[in-house]
Amino acid sequence: MGQDADRREESHLRFSRRRFLQAAGGVVVAGSLNSPRFAGAQSERSSMVDAFDGDVAAATVAQLQAGMETGSLTSVSITQAYLDRIDDVDRAGPSVNSVLMTNPEALDIAAQLDRERQEQGPRGPLHGVPILLKDNIDTGDRMVTGAGSLALASPAGADATVAARLRQAGCVLLGKTNLSEWANFRSTRSSSGWSGVGGQTKNPHVLNRNPCGSSSGSGAAVAAGLCAAAIGTETDGSIVCPSNANGIVGIKPTLGLVGRTGIVPIAHSQDTAGPMARTVADAAAILTALVGGDPADPITSGDGVQRHPDYTLFCAGGDLAGVRLGVARNYTGFHERADLLLTQALLALAELGAIVVDPAEIPHRGAYDDAEYEVLLYEFKSGLNAYLAGRPELETRTLADLIEFNLAHAETEMPLFRQEIFEKAQEKGDLTEAAYLEALETSKRLAGPDGIDTALQQHGVDALVAITGGPAWPTDPVTGDHFLGGCSSPAAVSGYPHITVPMGTIFGLPVNLSIFGAAFSEPILIRVAHAFEQATRLRAVPRYLPEVDLTQA
């Protein structure tokens, strides 16, 4: 270990262009911000993404807000435009199939917000902005909250904390998005983006590719321009993986920033909601609305919780001078072209002034996978039973009831895969058992203090970067997901923040850069993500291709 530490210490150098090219074997010449190839791609993508001609599909939150301020747009016109796109793109046309239902009250809410703007002024930067919610987030309206399952086919009695905070900020709750049923915690052979209620969501870039999950519909809908932004939830990877597969920005906040009451749970030690958007600034604005205390969620009032009144303030400026970024090399190698994109991304970060420390590996990769799974099984049974008990309108009141429901409705609920994870969770006892407590201590320690924290301290870096995951795999309803790998687990298990931002495409399939760090380090992560985004402009616009175009490098 001492020799390894010495070897890594030797690489704690600020990259000059020459040294970077030497270290990379010269393969990143095309990645230079000053090279014609990179600049051309940057300009082309920038014009596609940033030009705003009134088309809401590419609009940022700031552009929508500016249009409403000048009167060229209204919340009603924006909401109607997104509803039209859902009809034209999601239900017809390429049939992305990302939206389970639209809010029948959306236009009425938008009209009320327009009147309020005229009479009192806007509540804030999200006033009148339409947002989609993942279908495991309760809304106290006429929309169903079902986690994609036919067993929960009824509206909830009240808003989840995150839904209430979005309403308070002036958002229009536009509808509910499809998801991997039960947030991908029913079977080991599931197809991400499939639910009994919604069927299979498609990837809008290449329609026979998978959108990842479990926030599949949220990711696909944002990429396809069906909303201004969406809310996803994550236990391990469910925000960052679909953000990667669909080529958008996703933020998984530190555990405790966002209240979780009214969200169908998997594991209280890891679950959180977070924004999914087309830009870092949009995601930061929505994060600002989401954060806050939740009286029914004690973790939001725990010692050390650090909240900021406006996360968009960390989007100012593009200079990363003095920021030290470590490269988690043990979370690379998923695909050789993704590794090349990372090399180009590191050069871009260095040219922005960042000090790139390479490698800065995170200890204990894979060492806590079994412990994490054990924790999730225990907490799922406990948390889901408590959630269902709070939905008196439901006939299924326990996990055992859900297992029986699925068996009785196997043709519609289990035509493709079974429910072995449900069955394993049902076998677990309560949260006082030694097996659970030991697994929880092991997974938290190895991922957090002995994992991310150790990497940050050992290498003297402010944040870590890695490849979020490989390009989207072909959707396979027969054998399920073919996941190439990802870097979500350290931040997910520790409860630390994780931001993912587009860094390019492989044969037209998006691949993202991940940035993660210590608990409540959202400010530095947002700063790095925004600077990288603005310097590279690598978000690709969906083309709705039927299959991969191998002529597109």
Image (cartoon, rainbow, N blue to C red):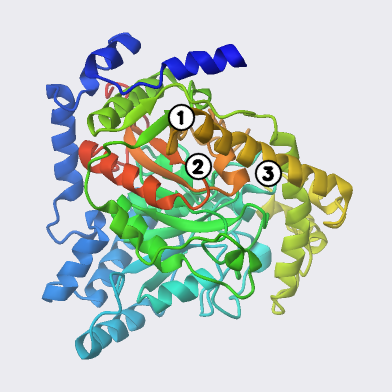
Q: Quadrant of the N terminus?
A: top right
Residue at image position (79%, 50%) is 425
Quick check: can you spot residue 421? no
Give the amino acid at mark 3. Answer: Lys
Residue 307 visible to an observer of this rendering = yes
Image quadrant in which you'd find residue 62: bottom left
Identify the element where label 2 is drawn: loop
Give the amino acid at mark 1.
Gly
Q: Amino acid at mark 2?
A: Cys
Q: Who is closer to the viewer here, 392 or 375?
A: 375
**Rendering quarter of residue 337:** top left
Nearest to the observer: residue 139 or residue 12: 12
- The picture places residue 30, in percent across and down from the top left corner, at 22, 19
How far apart are the two marked residues, 2 and 3, measured between alpha carbons?
25 Å
Residue mark closest to the camera, 3 vs 1 = 3
Foreground residue, 86 or 303?
A: 303
Q: Residues within 10 Å of mark 3 (few under 14, many from 20)?
A: many
Asked which secondary structure carries label 1, the reply is loop
- Assess disc 1: are there few (<14), some (14-19) or many (≥20) residues with their C-alpha within 10 Å of its C-alpha: many
Horizontal arrangement in the rendering, residue 129 relative to residue 463 (left or right) = left
Residue 142 placement (x, y as % from top left): 51, 79
Q: Residue at x 36, y 42 (%)?
A: 501
Name the residue beneath numbered marker 1: 470
